[in-house]
Every structure is written in structure tokens, then in C-alpha cells.
Image (spheres, rainbow, N blue to C red):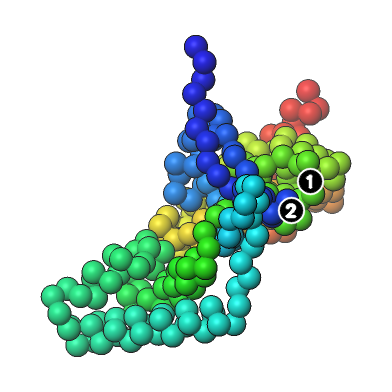
């Protein structure tokens, strides 16, 4: 049975032309993209994936004859006009929010212009302003052409694969020898990395210092898990040094290394497996 491929148009910033992309997403990719938070992050560290980096940087282009296209620059006039329009909406929201003007008017404006989950319960005028300014700027910029997303990152040269939905540029093995070495080095510890993420989340939720709906917390948890992993990735030499000097408990080693006790336990387990 022939697989049906979905297609979409995207802008190639190097050739300055619209290209046809074939959507061949596997079940693994669809599962990752369906997660509200995980789709943004590299599988091996806390950095954004190449794909999420391109999604976060749309362009405005103007189509030309023969399938070509050119980018529309973000001029001072576009920026100024967007600021004026945004300020009018912000002022209107401030009045509606402060004085209760209209029937649930401020709520309707929140639903129309904002991502409620990103606001994290901050429905003040400042919170509304943070949400709306970039949206109005993109809308105003889009009046001069067509809003599109790039086919690759600005740092990628001709002939490279499309942005990875699994890895950041540093860990994508297709980006070159250095990235391939980083991928091979960290891929071996992906299980430990996932366990560290679970441990940090568990401790954070228990102590009420982390919120699962906070995107920033998801980033911080992954960054901290990767930091701990780096401290323990070649840890057997470090741990053996500590063991040789004096008898230490796992909790004491964890404090000395600045990582969790569970991370030390995983490192000791890996050390014993290597000796077998």
C-alpha cells in the first residue's frame, strides 16, 4: 500500500524561493509534536530543537514570477505602526480590565489575543502586553506579504537536511563531526537523563517549587538534569577518587558533586556493571 504524503509550502532563505515540503512524519515524530512541552526540547539536553527554533522565527515573503520569492524587511515603519496598534488594544484591555467595561470584554480579549496557559494566571495589563506585542508585530508585517516558516536554520548551508524535530543543532549527528561526537557521547546516557528529569520533577512538585504548566520550569528541569548528567557522565573516575580518599555515603557524594543522590546511585550502578 502506497503511503500518502502530505505537502506544504515553505520559504528557502538561501534560494529565496518557495519550496514544497513532504510531510513524512513517523509515529515517533507525531507523538513528540503532540506533547505541549516536550516537542520544543532536544532529546539529549535542554536546548530547543532545530525545528522549534525555525518555528519561532517566521519570515514574511513576497511571491515573484516563476516560483521565486523575496523577503520583506522588517522596517521601522512596520515596527512603529505595530506598536501604535498594539498600544490601542492594550489601553482598551486596561480600561476593560480595570473598570469592567462591557460584558466580559476583558475575557474575550484574552481568548482572542493570548495563550492563557503561557500567561500563568497573570491577567494584568503587563501580562497582556507581553502576549500581544509580538503577535501584532507579526500581523502588521504580514500585511506586506505572506507569513511563512523557513526550511532550515540560518546557520545551515546548502544541501543540509531539514531542521531536526528531535535534536538541537549541537546534538544533530547530521550537522558534522563535532555534532556527531556530541550525539554519540550523550546518546549513551539518555536513560540516566530521563531518570534525572523525573527525579527533579518529583522533588520540585513535592516541595511546590515547580509547576508542570510552566514552560520555563520545563526548560529549567531539563537544563538542571543535563548539568547533573555532565557531572556524572564520566563519573566513575570522580566517584572512585572520592571512594579512594574516604568512605562516603551516596548523599555525601551527591553534596560534594552538586547533584542528586539518585544520580550518584545510577552512576555507581553503571560503574559496577562495567566491572562485571
Q: Which disc number belongs to residue 158?
A: 1
Q: Residue at 36% across / 67% down in the picture?
A: 114
Q: Residue at 61% across / 67% down in the picture?
A: 72
Q: Do the residues labelled 1 and 2 touch (CB within 8 Å)?
A: yes
Image height of 123 relative to 248, above or below: below
Residue farthest along the front direction in this orientation: 65
Q: Name the residue under label 2.
A: 14
Is residue 260 in view from this perspective? no
Total numbered labels placed on residues in the image: 2
Give the percent coordinates (x, y) of residue 83.
47, 82
Quarter of the image where one finds residue 190: top right
Which quarter of the rendered picture does the C terminus lie within?
top right
Distance between mark 1 and mark 2 Cα atoms: 8 Å
Q: Is residue 275 left or right of residue 69?
A: right
Image height of 199 relative to 123, above or below: above
Q: What is the secondary structure assignment of the residue under circle 1?
A: loop
- The residue closer to the viewer here, 109 or 29, is 109
Local packing at callout 2 (Cα closer than 10 Å; few below 14, some 14-19, many 20+) is few
Give the percent coordinates (x, y) of residue 234.
80, 44
Image height of 18 relative to 274, above or below: below
Give the percent coordinates (x, y) of residue 44.
66, 44
Image height of 28 relative to 159, above or below: above
> First in sequence: mark 1 or mark 2?
2
- The residue closer to the viewer here, 137 or 167, is 137
Q: Residue at 44% across / 41% down in the picture?
A: 34
Q: What is the secondary structure assignment of the residue under circle 2?
A: loop
Q: Residue at 55% across / 51% down in the picture?
A: 40
Give the percent coordinates (x, y) of residue 13.
69, 55
Q: Is residue 243 left or right of residue 187?
A: right
- The residue closer to the viewer here, 66 or 164, is 66
- The residue closer to the viewer here, 143 or 163, is 143
Amino acid at each position: 500500500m502506497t503511503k500518502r504524503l502530505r505537502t506544504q509550502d515553505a520559504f528557502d532563505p538561501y534560494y529565496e524561493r518557495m519550496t514544497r515540503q513532504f510531510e513524512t512524519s513517523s509515529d515517533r515524530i507525531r507523538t513528540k509534536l503532540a506533547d505541549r512541552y516536550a516537542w520544543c526540547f532536544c532529546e539529549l539536553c535542554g536546548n530547543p530543537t532545530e525545528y522549534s527554533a525555525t518555528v519561532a522565527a517566521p519570515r514574511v515573503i513576497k511571491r515573484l514570477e516563476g516560483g521565486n520569492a523575496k523577503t520583506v524587511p522588517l522596517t521601522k515603519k512596520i515596527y512603529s505602526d505595530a506598536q501604535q496598534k498594539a498600544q490601542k488594544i492594550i489601553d482598551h484591555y486596561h480600561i476593560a480590565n480595570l473598570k469592567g467595561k462591557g460584558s466580559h470584554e476583558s475575557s474575550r480579549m484574552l481568548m482572542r489575543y493570548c495563550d492563557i496557559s503561557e500567561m500563568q494566571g497573570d491577567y494584568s495589563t503587563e501580562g497582556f502586553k507581553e502576549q500581544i506585542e509580538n503577535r501584532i508585530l507579526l500581523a502588521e508585517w504580514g500585511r506586506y506579504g505572506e507569513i511563512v516558516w523557513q526550511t532550515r536554520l540560518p546557520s545551515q548551508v546548502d544541501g543540509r537536511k531539514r531542521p531536526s524535530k528531535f535534536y538541537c543543532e549541537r546534538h544533530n549527528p547530521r550537522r558534522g563531526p563535532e555534532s556527531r561526537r556530541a550525539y554519540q557521547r550523550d546518546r549513551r546516557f539518555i536513560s540516566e537523563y530521563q531518570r534525572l528529569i523525573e527525579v527533579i520533577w518529583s522533588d520540585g512538585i513535592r516541595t511546590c517549587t515547580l509547576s508542570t504548566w510552566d514552560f520555563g520550569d520545563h526548560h529549567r528541569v531539563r537544563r538542571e538534569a543535563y548539568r547533573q548528567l555532565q557531572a556524572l557522565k564520566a563519573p566513575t573516575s570522580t566517584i572512585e577518587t572520592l571512594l579512594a580518599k574516604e568512605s562516603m555515603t551516596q548523599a555525601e557524594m551527591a553534596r560534594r558533586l552538586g547533584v542528586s543522590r539518585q544520580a550518584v546511585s545510577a552512576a555507581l550502578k553503571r560503574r559496577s556493571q562495567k566491572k562485571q
